[in-house]
Image (cartoon, grey):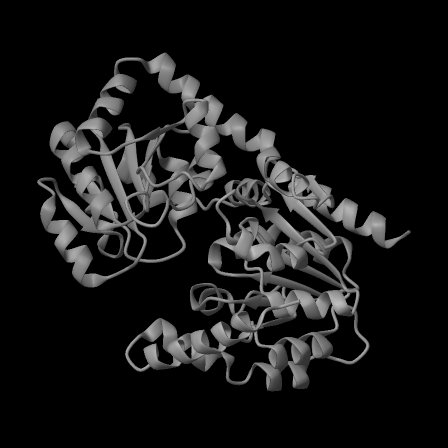
């Protein structure tokens, strides 16, 4: 049974976002994007069609859902796909994703919204990605005996539903048809609490980054820029990480080429960053055949190039580790290279794995970053060994998507 305080809290949460939307653009998108969700679905969904509902909280989880969507479209094309997002950072970027038949925000998790949504959508299968466990939606799916799964899930002992006060939520989670988890620790967390419908399949992101590596674009200007020098790339960087790369550039000068792809394209921050280097810097939008070879630092001021840029890199720093948590290390790892990250990485299984095998190095300062690079420069065999381990790790972990769909449709045929 869902306690009253949860439903009251959800309504207060929705009210707080409305207040925040007066000044906060992200909150405004959250509110505005949900205004016409039910009208959109009522006008779009054809009664009687078989529908698969896939929910991704944000953009990162969408990337985990993407291999599943692509394989569903390829192997089970009779199903229509509804893709929902919780966060504007996912919806606003992927609202035109062509392989989903319907795309919208997930309405706030009230009793009324959940009941109306599930009745309207009436999904044959539902896949929630990683987390975002909304009690009323889960309850409505379970009351109607819809098949509901969680993919690429990962659990830790400090999560709310493993504590005494979250026992009611664990009871709801225990009725999910199956958890497809990333690791054995997560499996143990569930089994030790009598949740037996769990399978370790790994993370679907590995399938996604392998696909990305196969689709990497050739970037002739970047090839000219790199020449025969090692290329150090900062991927999805924030100011703290950019400071480290600036210090690295002061130590190595033009022995390296440097590419920085900021997490957010902000003209003010990019101008500030550009001034910090003692080397010749250009924005990617300023590059021409005539000026590219004389440049030491490229700052990427557009979106969509990062995964292809990694294919030219020899070392990478992945941003976010001095804030809430690191960004995607796997895109860099699949191309094979030593990777550096900040200290806030404990919640990321792939980071822990890559640290254990010596591909990822956790750094706290520019001096540590420089020391690691000096170590690699004096040990080329070690550098090559790390590159091979990096690629091998990603290939070894692939295959989660096939395992999930084989299980789901094998059970469905019984």
Residue 127, x across and y down, in percent: 66, 58
Kindly identify the residue that appears in the image at 22 percent across and 27 percent down.
368
Kindly identify the residue that appears in the image at 62 percent across and 68 percent down.
2
Give left or right: position of 285 versus 309. left
Give left or right: position of 199 versus 255. right
Task: Residue at the far right: name it.
Answer: 414
160 or 90, which is in the foreground? Answer: 160
How many labels were placed on the picture?
0
Quadrant assignment, res 245: top left
122 or 315, which is in the foreground? Answer: 122
Establish if 29 lies above or below 368: below
In what quadrant of the picture does the N terminus appear? bottom right
Residue 72, x across and y down, in percent: 71, 55
Task: Residue at the far front: name it.
Answer: 164
Residue 308, x across and y down, in percent: 42, 44
Quadrant assignment, res 383: top left
Residue 295, x across and y down, in percent: 18, 42
Residue 80 in view: no
Give left or right: position of 89 versus 227. right
212 or 42, which is in the foreground? Answer: 42
Residue 40 in view: yes
Give left or right: position of 344 versus 11. left
């Amino acid at each position: 049974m869902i306690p009253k305080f949860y439903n009251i809290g959800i309504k207060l949460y929705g009210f707080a976002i409305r207040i925040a939307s007066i000044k906060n653009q992200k909150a405004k998108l959250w509110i505005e994007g949900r205004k016409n969700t039910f009208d959109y679905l009522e006008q779009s969904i054809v009664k009687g069609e078989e529908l698969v509902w896939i929910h991704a909280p944000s953009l990162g989880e969408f990337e985990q859902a993407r291999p599943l969507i692509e394989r569903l479209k390829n192997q089970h094309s009779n199903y229509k796909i509804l893709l929902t997002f919780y966060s504007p950072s996912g919806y606003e970027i992927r609202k035109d994703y062509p392989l989903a038949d319907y795309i919208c925000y997930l309405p706030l998790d009230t009793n009324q919204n959940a009941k109306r949504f599930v009745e309207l959508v009436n999904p044959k299968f539902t896949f929630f990605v990683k987390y975002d466990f909304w009690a009323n939606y889960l309850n409505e799916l379970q009351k109607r005996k819809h098949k509901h799964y969680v993919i690429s899930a990962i659990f830790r002992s400090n999560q709310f539903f493993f504590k005494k006060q979250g026992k009611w939520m664990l009871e709801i989670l225990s009725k999910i048809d199956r958890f497809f988890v990333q690791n054995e620790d997560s499996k143990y967390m569930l089994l030790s609490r009598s949740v037996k419908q769990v399978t370790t399949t790994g993370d679907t992101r590995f399938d996604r980054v392998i696909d990305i590596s196969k689709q990497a674009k050739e970037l002739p200007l970047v090839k000219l820029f790199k020449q025969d020098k090692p290329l150090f790339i900062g991927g999805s960087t924030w100011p703290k990480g950019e400071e480290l790369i600036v210090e690295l550039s002061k130590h190595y000068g033009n022995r390296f080429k440097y590419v920085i792809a900021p997490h957010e394209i902000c003209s003010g921050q990019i101008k500030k960053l550009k001034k910090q280097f003692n080397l010749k810097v250009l924005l990617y939008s300023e590059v021409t055949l005539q000026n590219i070879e004389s440049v030491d630092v490229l700052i990427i001021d557009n979106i969509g190039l990062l995964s292809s840029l990694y294919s030219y890199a020899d070392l990478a720093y992945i941003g976010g580790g001095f804030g809430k948590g690191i960004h995607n290390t796997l895109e860099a790892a699949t191309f094979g290279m030593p990777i550096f990250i900040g200290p806030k990485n404990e919640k990321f299984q792939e980071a822990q794995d890559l640290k254990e095998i010596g591909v990822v190095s956790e750094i706290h300062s520019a001096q540590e970053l420089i020391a690691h690079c000096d170590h690699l420069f004096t040990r080329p065999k070690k550098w090559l060994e790390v590159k091979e381990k990096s690629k091998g790790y990603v290939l070894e972990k692939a295959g989660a998507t096939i395992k999930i769909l084989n299980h789901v449709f094998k059970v469905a045929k019984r």
